Image (cartoon, rainbow, N blue to C red):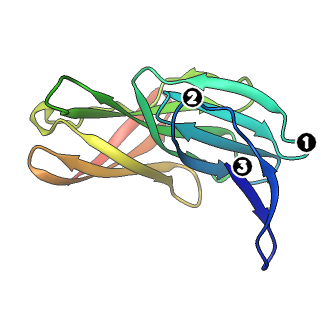
Amino acid sequence: VHVVFGAVVQVVKRIRAHKDAVTCCAFSPNGEQLVTGSYDGTMKVWDASDWSEVSVLRSLVNMVVHCSFSPCGSVLAGVCLSLQDSTSSATGAITIWDTVSWTQTQGPCGDAPDDHLQPRFMCCSFAPRGKVLAACGWGRSGELLMAWETAPRGWRALCCR
C-alpha cells in the first residue's frame, strides 16, 4: 500500500503487512484511520498519524474485496468472497465491524432473500446518513443489487434486484 499526499504524488508511507494482494482501502471519515483489505482474508486498521497497526480483522471467508466506513465512522463494512470449489464458483458476504472495539457485529445477511440467487457481492456503500447499506455484485440470475436498513434488532432488507 502506498499512501500519497498532494497534487504532486509523493509517497508518504509504504505499508507491507498483508500476505496476499491488497484489494481495497478506506479512510475513516475523520481521517484518523486507514483500513486495508486483502485476498489473505484480513482487513488491517492503521493509525494515520504514525501508520502503526491498530488491529487485524479476520473475515469468516477467504478474500476481502471491498471495505467502506459508515459516514459517522462507527461501523466498517467489508465485502468478502469465498471460493467454494475447484470450479471457482464464489459466494459473497458482508461483514460488519464496530470501530470502537474492532469486533465483528451482526450485519446484514450475505444471502439474498431468494437463496437461488447465490450472491457474490463485490462492493458496498453506506447512504450519507448511514442508515442504509447497499451492496452490488452478481448472482445466478445476473446483476444483483441489495439494500438493507439498520433496524433496532439488526438489519432489514429493503430491496433485491
| Along the line of sight, the residue nearer the viewer: 116 or 7 | 7
Left or right of 53 on screen, residue 108: left
Left or right of 81 on screen, residue 53: right
Precedes in sequence: disc 3 or disc 1: 3
Crowd rating for badge 3 (residues with CA inside 10 Å; few <14, some 14–19, many 20+): many
Q: Amino acid at mark 3?
A: Ser
Residue under numbered circle 1: 50
Residue under numbered circle 2: 19
Distance from Cα at disc 2 to Cα at disc 1? 22 Å
Residue 101 percent coordinates (x, y): 73, 23
Residue under numbered circle 3: 28
Residue 47 percent coordinates (x, y): 83, 39
| Along the line of sight, the residue nearer the viewer: 72 or 120 | 120
Residue 136 percent coordinates (x, y): 32, 52
Precedes in sequence: disc 2 or disc 1: 2
Q: Amino acid at mark 1?
A: Asp
Question: Across the whole image, how many numbered discs are drawn on residues?
Answer: 3
| Along the line of sight, the residue nearer the viewer: 18 or 51 | 18
Left or right of 143 on screen, residue 130: right
- The residue at the point 50 percent across, 38 percent down is 78
